[in-house]
Amino acid sequence: MLQKPRVLAAAAVTALVALLAACGAEGGTGPGAGADTDTPDLPLAGSHWTIAAVTVDGTRSVAPPGARLEIEENGRARGHSGCNSFGAAVAVNGDTLTVSTHEVTLIGCPADRDRFERALLKTFTGRLTGRLQEKGLTLASSDGRRTMELVAESGSPLVGTTWTVDALLSGDTSGSLPAGSEGKAKLTFGKDGRLTGRLGCNRVSAPAKITEKTITLGAIATTRMICTGPEMDLETKLYDALDGPLTYRLDHRTLTVTDVDGQGFTARAETVEG
C-alpha cells in the first residue's frame, strides 16, 4: 500500500430545505407568481426531486440513475438528465408551473440516455399543471400528452453517505469525467472515522477527523492495481485534487471539493434502492 499524508481544510455549509412546506398566501416562485389566481401556489421554491419517469404521447420512459430536478428560490430550475445538466427559468402561478429558456450542457450521451433526455426536455417546457401527492409531484401539459413524475428527495449528510464523483472542476468550469470512467470513483466518510472508497481504479483508505469546518486526513493508503486508461486518468486527477488544503460545500445531495487553485470535483450522493 502507498502512503501519503493529506490535510483537508473545509468550510462546511449544510442546509436542509423542507420539500413540501405549507403553502398559502406566501406567494410563488418567479416573477409574477401567484398573481390573478385564487389557487394557492404550489410550494416548490427550494424543493429537490428525483425524476422517476416522463411520458410523451403515451410512451413512458423510466429515468436513469442520477436524473434529478431542483427548483430554486430565485425563479430558476436546474437538474440532471442522467447524462447532461440543464437549467431553465420557472414561474409558479397557482397550480401552474411555466418553464422557459432551457440551457443544456453538450456531453455526448449513450443512445438510451439520449432518448430519455430528449423526452425529458420536451416534457419540461411551457405551461405545466402540478399535482402534489404525499411524497411526489406530477407535472402535466394542458393536453395531457406530456407528463413528468417526480419523487421528493431528502438531503444527505457528509458522514455515512457514498459520494459518486460526477464532474471535474477547474476554476468556474465544470467538465465531464474521462469517457468510460463514469461511476468509477466513490468516496465515503464513515462513522468509524475513516475515509474509504475508490479513486477510479484503486481503493483508497485513510483516517479522517471531521469537525464542523475541517476534515483532517491521516496517511492515505491505496492499492496498486493498473486499470484501463480512462479509470487511471480519472484517478490521477482525483489524487492530485486531494493533495493539500481543500474546501468543500455540501448542497443538499451534492458535494463540491476544491483546492486553493479552484481545482477539484463534484460528487453526488448515491441513491439507495428500496
Image (cartoon, grey):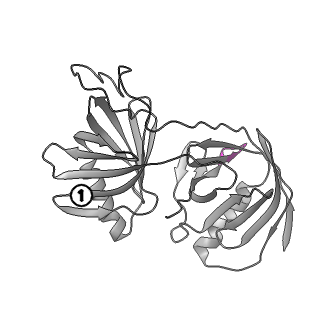
Q: Residue at x 51, y 58 (%)?
A: 176
Q: Residue at x 42, y 43 (%)?
A: 78
Residues shaded magenta: 258-263
x, y percent for residue 267: 59, 54
x, y percent for residue 124: 28, 47
Q: Residue at x 56, y 69 (%)?
A: 181
Residue bearing the label numbered 1: 55
- Tell which of 33 and 107 is nearer to you: 33
Q: Quadrant of residue 107?
A: bottom left
Judge from the rendering whether residue 19 lies leftward or rightward of residue 264; answer left or right: left
Disc 1: CA contacts within 10 A as few (<14), some (14-19) or many (>=20):
many
- The secondary structure type at the circle numbered 1 is strand
Q: Residue at x 35, y 23 (%)?
A: 24
- Tell which of 47 and 40 is nearer to you: 40
* Position above or below: 66 against 70: below
> Can you name the residue that lies furthest to the left here?
143
The residue under label 1 is which amino acid type?
Thr
* Position above or below: 1 against 120: below
Taking the magenta stretch, the answer to whether it contains residue 261 is yes
Judge from the rendering whether residue 195 lies leftward or rightward of residue 256; answer left or right: right
Taking the magenta stretch, the answer to whether it contains residue 14 is no
